[in-house]
Amino acid sequence: LHHGGHLNLTLEAFWLGCPSSMVSSTQGSSGPSAKHTSVAFLKTHKTASSTVQNILFRFAERNNLTVALPITTCDHQFCYPRPFSAHFVHPHTTPPDIITNHLRFSRTELRRLMPNNTIYITILREPGAMFESLFTYFNQYCLSFKRVPNGSLETFLDHPWSYYRPEEKDSMYARNTLTFDLGGDKDRPSSEAPAYAKRFAAEMERVFSLVMIAEYFDESLVLLRRLLSWDLDDVLYVSLNMRTPDSKSSLSSENTAKIRAWNAIDSVVYDHFNASLWRQLRALGLACVEREVQLLRQSRDRLVRSCFGGHLPPLRSAAQITNKELRPWQPSAKVEIVGYDLPVNMTQKGHVPPRDECLKMIMPEVQYTRLLLRSESLRIRKRFPLRSSQQTLRTVGQVRAHKESPAPSLNPRPSETMARLRLSQ
Ligand SMILES: Nc1ncnc2c1ncn2[C@@H]1O[C@H](COP(=O)(O)OS(=O)(=O)O)[C@@H](OP(=O)(O)O)[C@H]1O
């Protein structure tokens, strides 16, 4: 797939007059450039960020990179909503190349943790769609939403201040969530909000080399791949963490306008980065971008066919998925999140099981995080077999020097992942 992909892409580039780095960034006129491997992806809420995270997790595994993961007491997030601290990182996962689990952004703390040449990336989503998703997803979780009669979004939007308490636990899901995730002030008074939002967006622009936009996910991947000098194959994905159509409500333009007014800072930030995404895409040439998007989708379809013998495994709501390892986390029974259910015979003895990389492509965030932590801990224990766990914790700070030597890959082998899948059914 890799070589065939390159050949096709180079030919496509020739016919379209695209810059060659556009479609095959490892084959520029000055020779192949190395893939960039130090990446901090700020995982914002309800923005397709789990899909991006999965791309990064798989890239890390294929390239034997270390992913910073949270200590167990932080759960699968870095003690969100507390501002990120390097102390939240599990010592078996330092020094990291990649960080991607949910955290509240702190530039200073991430700088302390990540290599100097780290590229910062994040993703935003149109505030109306994002808020509708947050409102449904955290309906029973976030008190600002829970106290709304009949769980009605319209009722909330008519009088948000009747339900919202800025200082309350989980209030960050109910107003300017993007701004909060980015480390900003979600409750800046309305009189100051426009100026604050502009300053904040400008500051983010200095930190983040790429701000992806969920509505233009594939176009954003074109920019991501180019920025990091990755191959097209490195950004193939299937969408994760979706709701069933029944769990979604359509928004009137009036309600979208109310959401934008309520989330005024997020709206300015989104508009700013949506415009900047399109400036970057236009600079590359829209025809080239569109062609690369098509190639990406074709490659993904090929991968899906080779992985699952035809189509993607059926989408089912979490409760219906027999296999625990593939069951997405669901915040309450009132919202249905879908995942991919592998047919039972695909995971039984005697059948050719899907490859490890295929299973991981459909694995939800929580299970994949757990799996990575296990494999990274195993790698540390193999490197320091005679040390006590205390000594190991102290020595992990020195690991970067060892990483350059070719270490055997300790990622769980396909059969191990399959065995775990069988056990958890
Ligand atoms: N590729 C792609 N393109 C566009 N949108 C996508 C994609 N993948 C996932 N999704 C949608 O993103 C929503 C889930 O976002 P997150 O994974 O960031 O959620 S979470 O905060 O980690 O729970 C969730 O939105 P809703 O279904 O509206 O809730 C997903 O459907």
Image (spheres, helix red, strand yellow):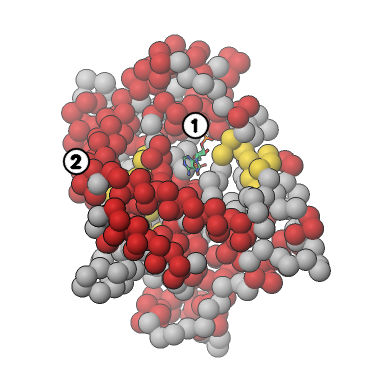
**Res. 234 in view:** no
Does residue 34 appear left or right of residue 332 in this picture?
left
Q: Which residue is mark 1?
A: 134
- Three-letter amino acid code of the residue under disc 2: Ala
Give residue 292's position: percent from left, percent from top.
37, 52
> What residue do we see at 58% from left, 14% from top?
149
N-terminal of the pair, mark 1 or mark 2, is 1
Give residue 325's position: percent from left, percent from top.
67, 55
**Res. 250 in view:** yes
Q: Residue 202 shows which numbered tag?
A: 2
Extreme-bottom residue of the structure: 386
The image quadrant of residue 196 is: top left
| Helix, strand or loop under label 2 | helix
Please state, as top left, top right, bottom left or bottom right, where the C terminus lies in the image.
bottom right
| Helix, strand or loop under label 1 | helix
- Three-letter amino acid code of the residue under disc 1: Leu
Q: Residue 80 shows which numbered tag?
A: none
How crowded is the residue under tag 2: few (<14 C-alpha within 10 Å), some, or many (20+)?
A: some
Give residue 359's position: percent from left, percent from top.
62, 60
> What residue do we see at 26% from left, 55% from top?
18
The reply to whether dot 1 and dot 2 touch (C-beta < 8 Å) is no
Extreme-front residue of the structure: 15
Residue placed most toward the observer, 289 or 274: 289
Asked whether mark 2 lies closer than 8 Å to ligand 1, one says no
Q: Whole-Å distance between the Cαs marked 1 and 2?
A: 26 Å
> What residue do we see at 67% from left, 63% from top?
354
Does residue 50 appear left or right of residue 193 in this picture?
right
